[in-house]
Image (cartoon, rainbow, N blue to C red):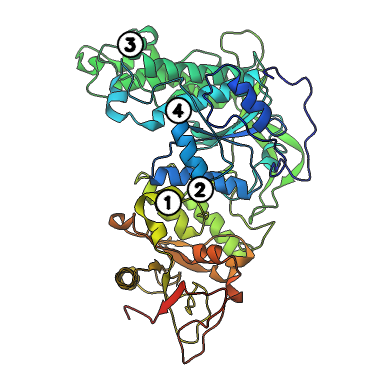
Amino acid sequence: PGGRPHARPALDAAVMLESAGRLPPFTAFGTDLEAEGALARVASQLAYQRELIIVCSDAAPTASASNALNTVLQLRALGLHHVLFLSDSPASCLSMRGALPGIACVWSSRLPKTMPANPGLCAKMYWGYAFYFYDLRKHYAARLAIEFGVNVLQTDTDVVWLSNPYPTLKGIYRGVQLVSMSDTPLVNAGVFYAQDVRPGDGAAWVLRELSRRLHLFITNSSAVKQYVPWAQPPYFANIDEQTIMNDVLRSSIANVTSYAQATAHWEVKKGATGTRKNRTFRWKETAEYALLNFLGKEVPRRKVRAKLNATARVGELCGAPRLNGLSKYPLHEVGSPRPARAWLSIAPLWLFMPFPSSFSAREIRTCERNGTMGVDGAGGAPFVMGHMAGIRTGAWSRRAILRAHGWWEAGADRLLSAYYGWANRTSRLAVAEPAGEVRNGSCAAPLESGPLKQLDLLVGNLILISHALGRVPVVPQVGCAGLHKPGQTIGHRVRPFTRRGGAHRALLGTCGWMPPRACYRLHYSTAAELVDAKGSHAAELPRCSSSDSRPAASPQAGPAAGSTGPLGS
């Protein structure tokens, strides 16, 4: 243990790295990765055919931790169990195991969770768990890739994984060392894949340098002066992993050392820095400003287009995108005269998708138009992964968005449920219509659409009655038409149902309600979650007679499937 493998094992093309049921017992649970031999033990037990996925979160009863659990559960639903859950303490690992037995959770003492002793303005203004995990995940991704020869997929937790990424990563991108999500000015630091990294190549330099810069500026803000000579205290000391990653990548592509964007420019952007208080300072007269302009031209010039041997078709997605080539950038070990021996590619949107966006909405409409959204196994996903990096309204908002789309996994809310006492209510209340088909666990077909305020009124009444009866409201699905004007994108308070699978096919073509901000912590159920809880195809649930809006007694319906007549009409 601890050494690089001498030979690469053959890829099992039949399962495409589906590790469910193929991993040895994980005995490193709750281990401090800084302990001697700990990382080697993790790599030997959890890396499946040299592949490992890294997810980070604490275990507080928050929507953020629920989003992390949802991410792990989605990956596991795809058969990808080789997930390393990096948390902040042994206690957090125990809490996570209580929510998800079998989770491979570890922690690290590499960095204190509290604000560093010599913080820059960036840490003082924004310090939180995010920066702690920025440092840890970049450090261990670098070590795993370079020292142990493990291919690492790092994912944020504000994401939705709808399809297995490995057919694309090991197929189209098999000769590319770094594949990253697109963002400004080049990549997003939250989702990327590193494969076949070798000591001394450009990809190894990028991973190590990114880790080094993050740790340095987190722990010693005064180090800014070493790399930006004109900077004056108090230093901003930017510790945002994305801007630093872009600086490092553009350095490697152009084979120059640059701190121009992430470090120098942020000393200028923030008004409280000593640099901004210096009235004689001129940003546009600095070498860093000139370097930024140079990189803005040089990096695009270094991009090359490589033609594939044969056109590749991604059949697991609704749009079945085709590629006959890919663009990539050379990665140098900065300062070395050797030619580049590694490459970076920016993932296409259908692989790592900004979500919600006009692009993701287009792909969802393609699924709906092709009638493939509800097909199990193939052709049913609008994109491989959607990343909610653009959602700035917090983790509760992201959770609500995923639930409305039907992309919330059973069990993701176990920490929240225990904290808020949600488990104390098991009986549900849903809206019913006479002669309707049981779809929400009641006798209600998806309701006809109407203005959003009418839907809010209906849901509000349902919530009040549910609270009075001690039940959990089941938010009704509604027809999407009429909730927005023709040609407009569906509004941010309703989302088209896009969950795959035969058990949810009856809900396709409907829209899910999203609570307003004041109701984010509301305990409610969705139609998809009720189908999941019953473990039954919606069409197999009992139907109502035209004279009775209550579901007939049955093992599927049970006492939890309470119903009420239409409200807010």
Q: Which mark is residue 134?
A: 4
Q: Which residue is mark 2?
A: 70
Residue 184 in view, yes or no: no
Disc 3 on helix, strand or loop? helix
Of the image marks 3 and 1, the number of the one nearer the N terminus: 3
Confirm or deny contact between disc 4 and disc 1 (CB under 8 A). no
Q: Which mark is residue 250?
A: none
As measured in the structure, the alpha-carbon distance from the residue carrying label 4 to the one carrying label 1 is 22 Å
Confirm or deny contact between disc 3 and disc 1 (CB under 8 A). no
As measured in the structure, the alpha-carbon distance from the residue carrying label 1 to the one carrying label 2 is 9 Å
* Badge 2: residue crowd in 10 Å (few <14, some 14–19, many ≥20): many
Disc 2 on helix, strand or loop? helix
Q: Which residue is mark 3?
A: 222
As measured in the structure, the alpha-carbon distance from the residue carrying label 3 to the one carrying label 1 is 38 Å
As measured in the structure, the alpha-carbon distance from the residue carrying label 3 to the one carrying label 4 is 20 Å
Which x, y percent locates residue 482? 40, 72
Q: Which mark is residue 399?
A: 1
Is the N terminus in the top left, top right, bottom left or bottom right quadrant? top right
Confirm or deny contact between disc 4 and disc 2 (CB under 8 A). no
Of the image marks 1 and 2, the number of the one nearer the N terminus: 2
* Badge 1: residue crowd in 10 Å (few <14, some 14–19, many ≥20): many
Identity, as a three-letter code, of the amino acid under mark 4:
Tyr
Of the image marks 4 and 2, the number of the one nearer the N terminus: 2
Which x, y percent locates residue 92? 45, 35
Which x, y percent locates residue 218? 38, 19
Q: Nearer the viewer, mark 4 or mark 2?
A: 2
Identity, as a three-letter code, of the amino acid under mark 1:
Arg
Identity, as a three-letter code, of the amino acid under mark 2:
Asn
